[in-house]
Image (cartoon, rainbow, N blue to C red):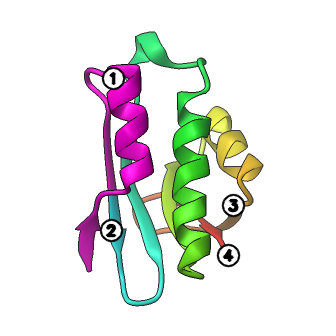
Amino acid sequence: MKSIKIDAIQSIVKRSNLKGFDITVWEHNNYLELVYIKIPSILRGQGLGSMIMTELCKYADKRLLPIHLEVIKTSSKLKSLYNKFGFKEDKINERDLLEMIRN
């Protein structure tokens, strides 16, 4: 597995001057894993998460790779965002987090 930088996402970050933004995506042999995404609270609700997820999904689609992620199972706002991008709930893991997959 390796950590990757997606140029289109880096462009959004630079264009929007996002201080405090962070994202970690790992590329495994046969899937991508969204490990971490942080958008500062002052910038939430402005569509940045959707723009970033759009670019991540485009990147995965070009490579025919599914995306895996974990989310706090009680976070309906995040689950709703991920559902909008085609993620399906998979299972609750040993850390009590909801695993979601987009094929």
- Quarter of the image that includes the N terminus: bottom left
Q: Which residues are magenta?
A: 1-24
Asked where in the image residue 9 lies, by quadrant, the reply is top left
Circle 1 packing at 10 Å, graded few (<14), some (14-19), many (20+), is some
Judge depth for marks 2 and 1 and give the one in front: 1
Closest to the observer: 78 or 64? 64
Confirm whether residue 99 shows in the render.
no
Name which of mark 2 and mark 3 comes first in the sequence: 2
**Residue named by callout 3:** 87
In the image, 94 versus 67, the foreground residue is: 67
Question: Considering only order in the chain, which callout, 4 or 2, is on the residue closer to the N terminus?
Answer: 2
**Which residue matches tag 1?**
18
Q: Which mark is residue 5?
A: none
The Cα–Cα distance between marks 4 and 1, rounded to whole angstroms, is 29 Å
- The magenta stretch spans residue 13: yes
Please, what secondary structure does the residue beneath circle 1 have?
loop
Quarter containing the C terminus: bottom right
* Up-down relation of residue 94 to residue 15 (above or below): below
Q: Residue, x 36% and y 32% (percent of image)?
A: 13
Alpha carbon separation for disc pair 2 and 4: 16 Å
Disc 2 crowd, CA 10 A, few/some/many (<14, 14-19, 20+) = some
Tell me: residue 21, above or below residue 35. above
